[in-house]
């Protein structure tokens, strides 16, 4: 190999190593942001479901309120324990 080819390969390897570190840092940051977003969304969804259930209960629809709360609980359980609901 010529010296200039060796230098070019060394530069490419150095850039790839730097890109791997950047990529790993980006993936960690993206995962953290994604986890935070899901928590916030789950809190909002649970809050809306509770308000809807209470609204149904105050309007006299006990069955509708119970159905809303049970459905919300089952969805929350499936979200918190995804391994138990996935086929194997």
Image (spheres, helix red, strand yellow):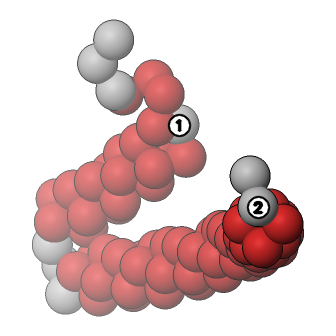
Look at the image and tell me in which quarter the C terminus lies: top left
Decide if residue 61 is on the left or right side of residue 28. Answer: left
Decide if residue 81 is on the left or right side of residue 50. Answer: right
Residue 66 in sight in this render: no
Tell me which corner region of the image, top left, top right, bottom left or bottom right, holds residue 50: bottom left
The image shows residue 81 at horizontal and vertical percentages of: 53, 37
Residue 57 vs 88, above or below: the answer is below
Going 35% across and 52% down the picture, which residue do you hit?
A: 75
Lower position in the chain sequence, tag 2 or tag 1: 2
- Secondary structure, mark 1, is loop
- Secondary structure, mark 2, is loop
- Foreground: 7 or 66? 7
Mark 2, Cα crowd under 10 Å, few <14 / some 14-19 / many 20+, is: few
Report the disc number at residue 70. Answer: none
- Foreground disc of the pair 2, 1: 2
Residue 88 vs 81, above or below: the answer is above
- Foreground: 46 or 35? 35
Report the disc number at residue 81. Answer: 1
- Foreground: 58 or 38? 38
Going 57% across and 81% down the picture, which residue do you hit?
A: 37
Q: Residue furthest top?
A: 88
Tell me which corner region of the image, top left, top right, bottom left or bottom right, holds residue 25: bottom right
Mark 1, Cα crowd under 10 Å, few <14 / some 14-19 / many 20+, is: few
The image shows residue 69 at horizontal and vertical percentages of: 35, 60
- Foreground: 63 or 33? 33
- The span from disc 2 to disc 1 (Cα, nearest Å) is 58 Å
- Residue wearing tag 2: 2
The image shows residue 7 at horizontal and vertical percentages of: 83, 71
Residue 40 vs 68, above or below: the answer is below
């Amino acid at each position: 190999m010529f010296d200039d080819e060796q230098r070019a390969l060394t530069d490419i390897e150095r850039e790839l190593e730097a890109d791997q570190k950047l990529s790993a840092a980006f993936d960690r940051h993206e995962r953290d942001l994604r986890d935070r977003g899901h928590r916030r969304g789950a809190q909002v969804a649970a809050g809306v479901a509770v308000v809807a259930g209470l609204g149904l209960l105050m309007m006299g629809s006990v069955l509708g309120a119970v159905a809303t709360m049970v459905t919300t609980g089952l969805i929350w359980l499936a979200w918190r324990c995804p391994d138990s609901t996935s086929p194997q």
